[in-house]
Each structure stands twice: as C-alpha cells, then as structure tokens.
Image (cartoon, rainbow, N blue to C red):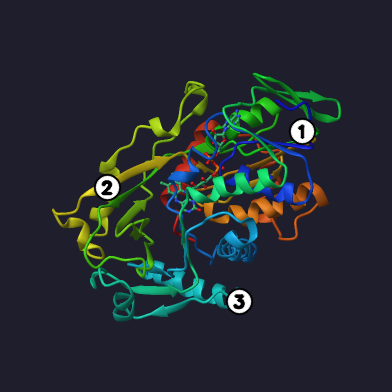
Amino acid sequence: MIAAADVVVVGSGAFGASVAYHLAQRGVRVAVLERAALASQTSPRAAGLSSQVRATPALTKLAQRAVAKLAAFTAETGQTLRFTQSGALKIARTDRDAEQLAREVVRGADAGVPIELVSVAEARRRLPILGERGIVAVTWSPTDCNVEPSELPIGYCRAAEKLGAVLLPHTPATGFDIGPRGVEGVRTPGGTIATRIVVDAAGAWARLIATALGGPLPVVPTRHQLLITEPIAGVGPHFPIARVIDANVYVRHERGGLMLGGYEADPLQVDTSTLSPSFDIANLPLDIEVLWRLARSVREQFPIFEDPGIRVAEHRGGLPTLTTDDRYLVGPLPGVAGAWVMSGCCVGGLSVSPALGEAMAEWILDGAPALDLADVSTARFAGHDVDETDLREHCRRAYATHYRA
Ligand SMILES: Cc1cc2nc3c(=O)[nH]c(=O)nc-3n(C[C@H](O)[C@H](O)[C@H](O)COP(=O)(O)OP(=O)(O)OC[C@H]3O[C@@H](n4cnc5c(N)ncnc54)[C@H](O)[C@@H]3O)c2cc1C
C-alpha cells in the first residue's frame, strides 16, 4: 500500500484507466484502486462500437477525437488493441427517423465526419445479410469503427503503470477523509492514501462513491446485453456495423459470427447499494429472451436471426450507468473540493474513453479541458433535487430511445 498520491482514481474500467493513463503521461503520481480484478467489470463486456455524428457539435468533436486516439492506440501506448474501421450503416424504418438521418448528414458535413445517405441496394452491397424490406432511408459512415473492448482498459492500465501509476487490484475505496478544504484521503482496507484529488470512475458503483464523498450523482445502473453467434458462412470483418433506429438494435461482425445487442423498453435497473461487496458483474443475471425479442423486431432487416441453425456462442451483459438526458456525466463533483467524477456512460463510454480521459486530465491539471465538455458536465445537474422515481423513469426513457437524436 502506498501512503500518498497526487490523484487517486477509483475504478479501473475504461473511464478510470484512461484518466489514470493521461494523468500519468503528464507526470502526475496516480494510484488506481480497483475492488475486483483490473478492468474486469462492465468495460470488457461492451460491444466496442463507436459512432461519431452525435447530438451536438461538442459531442461529435469528442467522439471524433476518441476515434483518432483508438486508431493510434497501439502507437501511443505500446499496448495491443484490435481496431477495425468497418464503417457503419444507420437504418430508418419510419419517415420520422429518415428525417433524423437527413439531419445527421448535415451535422456530419458541418463537423467534417464523412456520412451520406445511400440506397438500400448500396447498403446491401456492403452488408449482404441485410433484408430489403421495411427500410425508408440508410446512411453510410465509412470512418466509424469497432474495437476489442477487453483490450482497451487493461491496455490503458498497463500503459499507465509503465509511466509510474500504482495499480491496486482487489483494493476497494471504503471511505474518504474530507476536511475543510475538501478531499484529504481515501480509505482502503490496507490503510489511508493521502491525496487532495479523487476521481470517481466506479462504473455501476459511482453513485455510491459520490455519496460517500458527499455529492449527488443522478445516474442509474442499467443492464445491457448482447449475444454473439457461432461463425456463419460468408460473415466477415468487412461487414459494417448496422443500427436500426426505432428498434434500438445493433448488429456487427465478431469472430466470424454476428453480434446483436440492443435497448429494450423496460430494462432492468439495479440499485448497487443492495449488492454484496463481493458482487462481480460476471454474476449479473442475464435474460437472452430480451435479445431474441429485439432480433424478432428487426426480422425484415435481419432475417438471418430467424434461421433455426443460428447458435449462440456468447451471451454477455453489464451495468452501464444512465443519465436522464442520455449524455455522459463528468467533471467536478458539486460541493466537494478535490472530488471529480466520470460517470453516466450511457452505454457509450468505452469508445469515447480515450478522449474523455484525456480531457478530464486536462480539466483536473489545467483548470479546463481543451475540448468543450459543457454538454456533459456535472454542472448541468448541480443544485437540482433528485426524485428517485423520476430519475429512474427518465433514465429508462433515455435508454429506450437511445438511437433517437
Ligand atoms: C453489453 C454491452 C455493450 C456495450 N457496448 C458499447 C459500445 O458498443 N460502445 C461503447 O462505447 N460502450 C459500450 N458499452 C458501455 C461500456 O461498457 C461502458 O460505457 C464502459 O465500460 C464504462 O466504463 P466504466 O469505467 O465506467 O465502468 P467499469 O468498466 O464497470 O469500471 C468501473 C470499475 O470501478 C470499480 N469499482 C467500483 N467500486 C469501487 C470501489 N469502491 N473501489 C475500487 N473500485 C471500485 C469496479 O469494480 C469496476 O471495475 C456497452 C456495455 C455493455 C454492458
């Protein structure tokens, strides 16, 4: 156990590992506390998809920066990351969603992200398993990508360690010493680490950590699942990612088979304060029927999932945190000097973590990030009272309409 650190990061998932790496790169003495094995909880279970045209120009810039850093990850950190620039198709089945796609093309053009409307025939040329019925409009984004999710947070952990960060797996933060000037230390079973700065990147447990620090964090851990089929003839890494807006379903290639995931209307929300301290995301109860229902909802576009020969090779899920407006929640924890938070991943934290961790390190060290984080800042909820029922209902709605912008 170490006695002191400039910054203590709680959590070694994509958020914590990235900010730890970017702080260590700036010469900061960082300690990373992790209650379980390093990078073992929600992050390695992600789908690994990115998309760059987002709801606001600032979010689009953040996602663009993240993709550039994912592409350069191995060169920058020396760590392995499977990076596939597969491109992405986004499918509208209603006139309303076709209008959304038209707006996204304009937003992409304004931001310099390649994206265009293509014909159904062109979409089928890129993704031969795509059915031709029920599609009103499709966009093609050639620079969208996917990565192997398990490699990203552990890669950042190892790269941070090489820069001097101290990694402490199986060491939970159990409490905080808060003095008149803010954070003074982080308690662990092995002793207290003196520090003036804590970053709460505790994933599904982030609200509990924020409460222990003394600040509010309006997020709801929400189960999200995907399946990966056994290899299917003709399916390969050249297949683009496909998303169906109204069905909230995504499909991509993985290991010669297909990955399917999506956002159901009534997701399981989990109160992590009721879980045992030894709870591991590997033990989260999953429900594959949720995924088959989503698959049936896109049967015209993906008839392949109706094939009785389809076999599931892997079914996994985790607990991303949702916010009421479906945007990340990062920045200073209101009311607690020296406490920072990286939360509200909204099922999109893995792919954006390279840029978000970099920006958070700048914010902590320089007083402001180079990228504009106002759209995702904790300031937007500061001072608002949280009604628990409303919070859960708004987060449920944000999850259930994730592809609507
Ligand atoms: C099925 C699925 C598909 C997804 N698909 C995508 C996708 O395509 N693209 C994308 O960008 N994102 C995706 N996500 C979301 C992505 O996984 C999350 O946004 C990301 O993993 C969040 O990282 P995190 O660091 O906040 O959480 P985690 O990876 O859970 O890390 C938090 C860590 O904090 C630790 N911790 C908690 N409490 C303490 C404590 N007291 N002391 C010490 N450590 C503590 C935990 O043990 C955990 O390891 C998906 C998620 C799922 C489940």
**CA distance for labels 2 and 3:** 41 Å
Q: Residues within 10 Å of mark 1 (few under 14, many from 20)?
A: some
Mark found first going from the N terminus, 2 or 3:
3
Q: Amino acid at mark 2?
A: Ala
Asked which quadrant contains residue 240, the reply is bottom left
Mark found first going from the N terminus, 3 or 1:
3
| Left or right, 368 with reference to 140 | right
Which residue occupies the foreground of this view, 59 or 172? 172
For discs 1 and 2, the disc positioned in front in the rendered view: 2
- Check the picture and name the quadrant holding the N terminus: top right
Q: Which residue is mark 1?
A: 336
Which residue occupies the foreground of this view, 399 or 67? 67
**CA distance for labels 1 and 2:** 46 Å
Q: Amino acid at mark 3?
A: Asp
Give the secondary structure at mark 1. Answer: loop
Q: Residue 214, how many percent across, how many down?
A: 71, 27
Mark on residue 313? Answer: 2
Q: Which residue is mark 3?
A: 110
Are the residues tagged 3 and 1 within 8 Å (C-beta)?
no
Report the residue at 30% width, 38% height from top.
Answer: 287
Is 306 located above or below residue 1 in the figure?
Answer: below
